[in-house]
């Protein structure tokens, strides 16, 4: 009686592929991203955001120009919506200002608060004492911190958006309530929370990558090479097992002839 041992071989080969898929999915967001900040609400604020992601670690640099000096500027990764900056038509109440709430259908809710210290979660979205407060009309922000899974997924999906807040509607050099109060926190003026600049965080080819891989700007190739090696090893093992099964069946056939 002949015995076939092909099923374990198939199972071994199939088991190799979920490992590769899971590993690839976990690293799908790794790499560098860049946002070119464009002005909102006639703020005149422009700049650049650079983000390097490796696992759950984000290294962030923001350079903003034309901001209101001496006032805190909240800044966030917004996620979970269309992944775009709001157009002028987002001003649904017609007051001439796109508020943070009016922009949310376009750039989403707060995923990460780019604070200067301490917590970086959504709960720190209005922690005005922990956001950049420049002495003049520009600032540079640099920090490395942990990002949550939903933020990682937003980067991988291409819908993470960098938003810098804080405008001076009447040009008097400070935030005041002349334009109204913030719908996010009535104790703050609208000027303090309204978006001043926005940029979609797109995969960049210019970032510095971790050592050990090619400097492609989209992520170190060392991880890809490692995954490839795992795949080759798994397939080789499957092939060897298959060859062994065939040889065994041949021996069985000879013995029973």
Image (cartoon, helix red, strand yellow):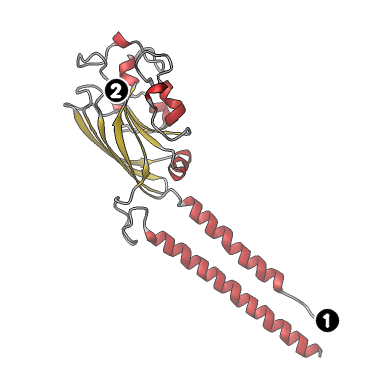
Residue at which label 2 appears: 166
Say whether residue 130 is left or right of residue 4.
left
Quadrant position of residue 195: top left
- The x, y position of residue 204, in whole percent, is 34, 48
Say whether residue 32 is left or right of residue 251.
left
**Residue 209's mark?**
none
User: Is label 2 in a helix, a strand or a loop?
Assistant: loop
In the current view of this chain or complex, which residue is farthest to the left? Answer: 136
User: Is label 1 in a helix, a strand or a loop?
Assistant: loop
Q: Earlier in the sequence, mark 1 or mark 2?
A: 1
Q: CA distance from mark 1 to mark 2?
A: 81 Å
Q: Is residue 109 visible?
A: no
**Quadrant where the image shows the C terminus:** bottom right
Q: Which dot, 1 or 2, sits closer to the camera?
A: 2
In the image, residue 27 above or below residue 59:
below
- The x, y position of residue 219, in whole percent, is 37, 54
Could you tell me which residue is drawn at 38 percent across and 12 percent down? 186
Looking at the image, which is closer to me, 13 or 147?
13
In the image, residue 11 above or below residue 121:
below
Residue at which label 1 appears: 1
Numbered label tally: 2
Quadrant position of residue 192: top left
Q: Is residue 49 visible?
A: yes
Q: Do callouts 1 and 2 mark residues in contact (Cβ within 8 Å)?
A: no
For mark 2, does the 10 Å Cα neighbourhood hold few (<14), some (14 to 19), or many (20 or more) residues? Answer: many
Looking at the image, which is closer to me, 60 or 98?
98
In the current view of this chain or complex, which residue is farthest to the front? Answer: 89
- The x, y position of residue 242, in whole percent, is 64, 76
Could you tell me which residue is drawn at 49 percent across and 55 percent down? 24
For mark 1, does the 10 Å Cα neighbourhood hold few (<14), some (14 to 19), or many (20 or more) residues? Answer: few
Could you tell me which residue is drawn at 65 percent across and 80 percent down? 244
Could you tell me which residue is drawn at 42 percent across and 45 percent down? 56
């Amino acid at each position: 009686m002949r015995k076939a041992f092909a099923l374990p071989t198939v199972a071994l080969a199939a088991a190799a592929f979920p490992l590769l898929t899971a590993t690839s999915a976990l690293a799908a967001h790794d790499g560098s991203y860049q946002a070119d900040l464009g002005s909102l609400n006639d703020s005149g604020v422009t700049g650049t955001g650079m983000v390097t992601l490796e696992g759950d670690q984000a290294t962030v640099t923001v350079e903003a120009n034309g901001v209101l000096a001496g006032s805190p500027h909240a800044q966030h990764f917004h996620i979970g919506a269309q992944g775009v900056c709001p157009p002028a038509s987002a001003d649904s109440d017609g007051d001439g200002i796109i508020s943070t709430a009016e922009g949310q259908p376009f750039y989403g809710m707060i995923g990460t608060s780019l604070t200067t210290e301490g917590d970086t979660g959504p709960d720190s979205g209005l922690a005005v004492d922990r956001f950049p407060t420049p002495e003049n009309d520009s600032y540079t922000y640099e920090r490395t911190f942990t990002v949550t899974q939903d933020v990682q997924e937003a980067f991988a999906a291409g819908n993470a958006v960098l938003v810098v807040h804080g405008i001076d509607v009447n040009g008097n050099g400070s935030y005041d309530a002349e334009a109204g109060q913030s719908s996010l926190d009535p104790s703050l003026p609208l000027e303090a929370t309204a978006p001043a600049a926005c940029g979609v965080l797109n995969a960049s080819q210019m970032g510095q990558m971790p050592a050990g891989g090619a400097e492609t700007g989209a992520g170190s190739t060392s991880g890809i090479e490692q995954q490839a090696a795992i795949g080759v090893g798994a397939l080789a093992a499957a092939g060897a097992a298959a060859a062994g099964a065939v040889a065994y069946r041949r021996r069985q056939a000879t013995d029973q002839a």
